[in-house]
Amino acid sequence: MKKYIFLFILPMIILQYSCHKSLDPKVYSSLTSANAFQTRSDAIAAVNAVYARLKGPAVGDNFDYWTVRHFALTDLTTDVGHCNYGGDPGQLSLALWNSANGLLAEDWRQIYKLISNANNAIFNIEPMKSITDGERAQFLSEIKFLRAIAYMDLTDAWGPVILATEKDIASPSYNSQPPVSSVAEIEDLLISDLTTCASTLPVDYQSNAIYTSNDVGRATKGSALTLLAKLYLRRHDWQKAADLTKQVMDLNVYHLYPSYLGLFKEDNKWCEENIFSVLSDANVNGTELLNHFGPESHPVVENRWQYYAVTWDFYNTFDDADERKACFYPEYMGVDGLIHKQPPTLGASPPPGEFYMADVATKKYADSTGSTTYYDGHSVDILRYADVLLSRAEALNELNGPSPEAISLINEVKGRSHAKLLDIADYNQSTLRDAILQERGWEFFYEGKRRQDLIRMNKYDVLVNAYLNRIGQPSNIVMPKNQYFPYPLNQVNVNPNLNNSDRQ
Amino acid sequence: MLKRDKAVCLIFSVGILIGLLIACNSGGEATAIKEIHIGLHKNNHLQIQADVLTAGLCNAFIEYWPTGEGEKKKYVSLPSLNKDKHSLLLLNISPHTSYSYRVIIEKNGTKTESKIYNFESVDLPPWLQDQFKDTSVQTNRLPNEFKNGLMLMNKRETPGMLYLVNYEGKLRWYHTINGTGFKVSHFTKDKTILSILGTNDEPTSYGSEILEVNLTGDTILHLKKNQNDFRYTIHHEILKNDKGQLVTIYADKRIMDLSTVGGSAKDTVTGDGIVILDTTGKEVWKWSVFDVIDPLKDPAINKNKKDWMHANSLNFDKDSSFIISFYNNGQIWKVNSHTGAIEWKLGKGGTLRMPNECNFTQTHAVHINPYGSLLFFDNGVEKKQSEVYALKIDEKGGRVDIDFHFKLPKEVYNERMGSAYMINDTTVLCCCSKKHITVLANKKGQLFWTLNSAIPPYRAQFLKEEEVAPYLKP
């Protein structure tokens, strides 16, 4: 019988097999990235993540974008900023750069990371069902304001750039080589976005229904109006700039802080002058501003690098009565036992016991009474009220020449620092423009404004070359070639539409 | 011949009959998996939920593995028992990865496997990407215990996050909370995470809610201030005792007459205490520094009144007494958990004699390590160098001896918060909170691994493989 056992087993196997085969279940999957944002907390976390990009990467390098490296583009490349270290910052400091400059590449990368996070958040928040329309409008406005900051910075530095928006998220193409958009096209988007932001965002976050803890660092109506004013100023659309700055003033929530030095104290996180700032807490999300800006070998502000400093040439333009001159470390006994000070003449050799500093460190992000730790809690003011006053003065002067109001606005800023006030009788439109440019230098050094101010007033080559010549360097700035930086080499390599032929 | 044909037919027919019986009994009914729905579990991008519908009641589970790595990296879901609608949870998911899986159902001891199917996990949302980065791995020197474990960290700002991270800086599990932040979190023996929740307005490790979640994201317990006897702001630590009760530090505010020392007749002095609550918020036991010392004996009480005695860590001694540390005077106390009496004080001005080398000032995460020593992280503010101490306490002799002690490199000096936990008998996981760095050090203070994090972790509690099993398999 053994030989028949297969007759017994065979049908069993066939039946087993056929039974299994007929039992294939239906499989459904809802695993798509479309359901990334489901709760209000998801939306808030996404919004917060875009703010966090103002400081660069989430981990490591706590000195990116608006918390240090952006200043390499905006201030080092002018008559104000100086870096005594070689390499990429040294090149920028001497107005010599090319597309391989690492700081240019890094700023581009970090700004686009913000834009990418912003676009992703907009794309995902727009269809959310679990938030109210009011919340949606609030969140989208905050994100679009931050994206506008990023595009303003990009177009300041590179002019026409790739315009990526939330529309690109629906069907992303990682190998596309998009063409650049003109500055005008990008500005159209920013004007539309910022106009919406100004009508949506609250004036402040006191008793706010969405954010219950008075979140002062978030975008507001005032910050949207101010950024829009800055955009029109850049376009030389003076009337709109004048109107918008007036709207900010009429909000009646901003005032100059009584003391310039006090404004930049580390513990003065937020005051009546702040319109939009990158805030830091040394305990939670500290920055390395103090490391980069603090004086070298200083007995109180210890172990700092004096990486980003100002030129002696610029420091010497301050009037002694001007309290802003006290915002520096021009002379001190170093921990090395040498007196650190300014050389009497360019290239002079110091006598024994002295050390001639190549540049002078500022207290703006190196408060001697603040953190003594590696990470610090200084904030960076991207938009503040003094800028509104001086922007309106500039717009008024461009519209009608010197006026009592324009002079009064400038003197309000000067008066806070007990600087010598202007007399209208001394100025015509052209000389007042120069005075405003100089005033902006004294007021906003290392606040990311200088290069754009010089370009807007057609003085980038004139003033920077004059400074370079004074320190024995050739006239390295050539306009219009140097109005925009070359596109970073690593970007050009992946997208030939980024054409550097007219900019290096 | 006829007989033989008949016999063949008979055998064949019996085969068919038995085959049908087996197929329909063990397979036909029990193996009928009708539908499989794959999606995210509670919208958590590292957790997949598979809802499986079967034709009849049975047990079910899923085996799954990253397709690229094959079945050698197989995970198994927890089973669903005796149901026809099974909700199976797949943990240990890596983002943006292809997975293969099969459903296995079981009835009457017979297992039936489905075909192998696939799914692709989704990417992490932007706010969870790039939050951790291991920077200096020397993998061959890392102890296996460390590689097989996870670190618990928490984000204090709203919306709060709990993170379980592996030695490669990979996020292996997370949990998000709406409207508040995770101020302090503690992994319990019940394989749950017990936390103090607080809003952005509340200081670093202070909060007003208690939340317990398990590793499948379910809420086990959620108490809010003013519920029953939970009437205090709590801070710095939350533990479970052997009875499953909640043990935490609370801020004790007392109205006192400070007019003789420059204050007002009805002034407020804030000290700290220990409170035990049951799971409904009912007070079981309470102790306060005011019970054992008189604030008026502090000559600077008017200056110190807002934060007179600032406790910053709490744990159990071997005998279930409490060990509590204070930031303001750098002392560590043992408090009897029945009588409230102080059994000893360690530190400057304490009751235990210490060797000269024992020179700590601000201690954190004070606990008894697995080898019986008192282990803690010292900020080392005066020396500007953080240290780790493990001390042998001789209670009868009234003295302590150093088990081991090391200084961390100055580069990771951490002047606030921090923690140190043993990984094995030679390595210590140290959290340098303010530097956003967690390091693995040997007993000489040499580092061979660091983890940078976007958050400043309040501390990094290490969870061994067996502590997170069967949910997670690091």
Image (cartoon, coloured by chain):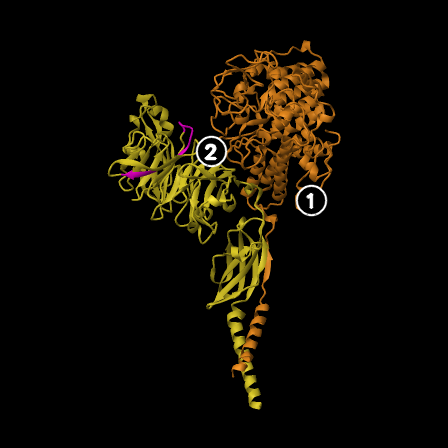
* Side of A18 relative to A235 (left or right): left
Q: Which residues are magenta?
A: B381-394
Pinpoint the chain carrying mark 1. Answer: A
Marks 2 & 1, CB-CB < 8 Å contact: no
* Residue B386 magenta: yes
- Residue topped by disc 2: B434
Q: Residue at position x 61%, y 48% from top?
A: A34
- Relative depth, front residue between A177 and B288: A177
The answer to which image quadrant residue B281 occupies is top left
Query: Which residue in the rendered view is the most extreme toward the top?
Result: A425
The colour with which the image depicts chain B is yellow
The percent position of residue B315, horizontal first and vertical second, equals: 35, 41
- Mark 2 neighbour density, 10 Å: few (under 14) some (14–19) many (20 or more): many
Up-down relation of residue A396 to residue B268 (above or below): above
The colour with which the image depicts chain A is orange
- Residue topped by disc 1: A175
- Mark 1 neighbour density, 10 Å: few (under 14) some (14–19) many (20 or more): few
Amino acid carrying mark 1 in the image: Asn
